[in-house]
Amino acid sequence: MKLEDIEKRIQELINQGNQVLASKHYDIDRNINIDSSKFMGFKTAMLSLILAIYGKTHPYYQEIERINSYYHYPSTAEDVLRVLESIKDEVDGGYLTTVKGIVSAEIFADIMSSAEYLLSENYKDAAAVMIGSALEEHLRQLCQKNNLEVEIIKEGITIPKKSDLLNSELSSINIYNKLDHKSVTAWLDLRNKAAHGKYNEYTKDQVNIMYQGVLDFLVRNSL
């Protein structure tokens, strides 16, 4: 999800939560309850949002899941809204983007470390594919960070954009310069050769240069 989509969805859920609280009424025992169907819809929507942003193992997801849907008191809706306000604070404060950047950096560091080991063991082809895969994913995340679409619709089917197109679009809005654009094009070409078994069309030294170049590119163009 893009940041603006997350912000929009949070506001929609805040409005939905307030509508749930506005449904307060007395039951036959004179207890104050809320509309059960509205609350169930609100809780389900919250779980969906948290799943998309943080994943199922996050404490926010577990907290909302823990709230008993069968107790339709205003306090249950208020509990969900409190979690929503915490998420809003994280998004508004830029914390969500920071966390994603840190996690991505750690993942890419692991991939590049594995590629370096493969190179040291003379597995240049596997290393080239691994380095290229890290580069492609980084381009995709850079596009998402800068609100560029990473998919296109062709004949009614949604398909991922090719890495060359992502590279061109990032360069066109000056996320990085033309020299980087040329380098990325060359690295993607080497990666494609490795992936398609054209092992004689490049050398281990070229993969070493690719490794150093991509590593520098990832650091300079962090998420």
Image (cartoon, rainbow, N blue to C red):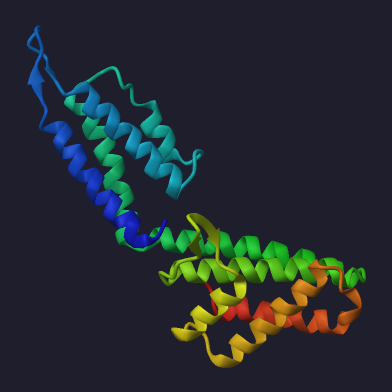
- Vertical order, 120 against 205 (above or below): above
Q: Nearer the viewer, residue 129 or 28?
A: 129
The residue at 34%/26% (across/down) is 67
* In this rendering, position of residue 129 left or right of residue 134: right
Say which quarter of the image contains residue 69: top left
Residue 195 drawn at (x, y percent): 79, 67
Task: Residue lying at the far top in this picture: please name it.
Answer: 29
Q: Residue at 87% x, 81% y: name it.
A: 201
Which quadrant holds the N terminus? bottom left
**Callout count:** 0
Coordinates of residue 43 in the picture (x, y in percent): 31, 32
Residue at the (25%, 44%) spot, across then down: 13
Depth order, front residue of 38/222: 38
Residue found at the very far front of the displayed protein = 155
Q: Is residue 8 in sight in this rendering?
A: yes
Residue 36, above or below 88: above
Q: Is residue 38 rendered to the left or right of residue 93?
A: left
Q: Residue at x 26, y 40 (%)?
A: 82
Q: Nearer the viewer, residue 77 or 148?
A: 148
Q: Look at the picture and state if 17 lies above or below 106.
A: above
In-image side of 146 versus 110 (left or right): left
Residue 154: image location, x then y, percent: 51, 61
Q: Splitting the image into 4 quarters, where does residue 207 fall?
A: bottom right
Left or right position of 70 against 212: left
* Res 203 visible: no
